Image (tube, grey):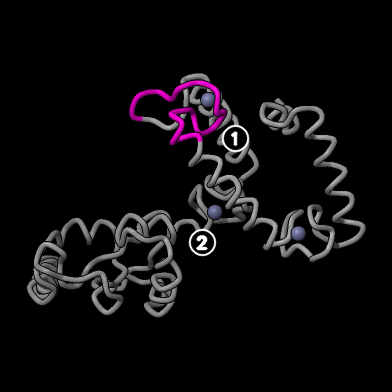
Amino acid sequence: MSCFDDRSHWLSAADTKLAGASLLYVMETQKCGHCKKRKPESGRVCSLCKAKQRERHRQKRQEREQAGLCTNCGMSPPVEGAKWCQACRDKGAVRHRSQSAHRLKHNLCYRCASPLGDTPSNYCESCVFKIIAVKNLGDASRADEIAELFDKQSRRCAYTGLPLTLGVDASVDHIIPRSKGGSDALQNLQWVHRQVNRWRSDMDDGDFRQFLLQVSQSILASAI
Ligand SMILES: [Zn+2]
Ligand SMILES: [Zn+2]
Ligand SMILES: [Zn+2]
């Protein structure tokens, strides 16, 4: 399947022609393909038009939901407990699979489709930070903070000094565990090796450091 075929699932011939024409327009004039006034920061549409589009889509989805219809097609009732009807869900699954295959094949980030280069994960660094921020702090907007912390630690484990690889073995740890009342504030966070994080579990920071010291002394002693 070529890349073009990939996209034909979700772009009709007319859409493709329109998108091509608008891309040409943007390339030639350096102006938003929608308002034809402002310069887009990236893509075809300026940020203001993008925001308006998002808001229109959000409203449409809301209206459909309130009317008890699939928020995607607005025609059939949704599957119970879901927002989309069965047909849209099936189409979405197919699209998702072909999109994922396309991204894998072309070494693009699984989440945002930006080029991965040598990144050893299927996600770009910026997406990994977002995913970890959501998973650990319940908030993608904390991604920048933990990215800064990662660099501040020279991308090494706070306990062992081992170099960390983002998207592979780097994990965010709460210095005072959440189970013991520790908060999500930046001062209570550190990057540690995923395996070390598991090993520590909910041990106190000081106790764990003591434990690591004993383990390393014992290993050194038995090596002599
Ligand atoms: Zn615009
Ligand atoms: Zn539908
Ligand atoms: Zn990404």
Say few, some or many: other residues with alpha carbon within 10 Å of mark 1 (under 14 / 14 to 19 / 20 or more): some
The residue to which callout 2 is attached is 126
The residue to which callout 1 is attached is 99
Between 152 and 164, the one nearer to me in the picture: 152
Residue 3 image point, x, y percent: 72, 33
Which image quarter is the N terminus in? Answer: top right
Between 84 and 124, the one nearer to me in the picture: 84
Between 103 and 50, the one nearer to me in the picture: 50
Identity of the residue drawn at 50% across and 39% down: 63
Magenta residues (range): 64-81
Identity of the residue drawn at 62% across and 53% down: 114
Q: CA distance from mark 2 to mark 1?
A: 20 Å
Identity of the residue drawn at 75% across and 28% down: 12
Quadrant for ligand 3 reads: bottom right
Q: Secondary structure at mark 1?
A: helix
Would residue 100 be seen by someone viewing this image from the given angle?
A: yes
Q: Secondary structure at mark 2?
A: helix
Between 126 and 134, the one nearer to me in the picture: 134
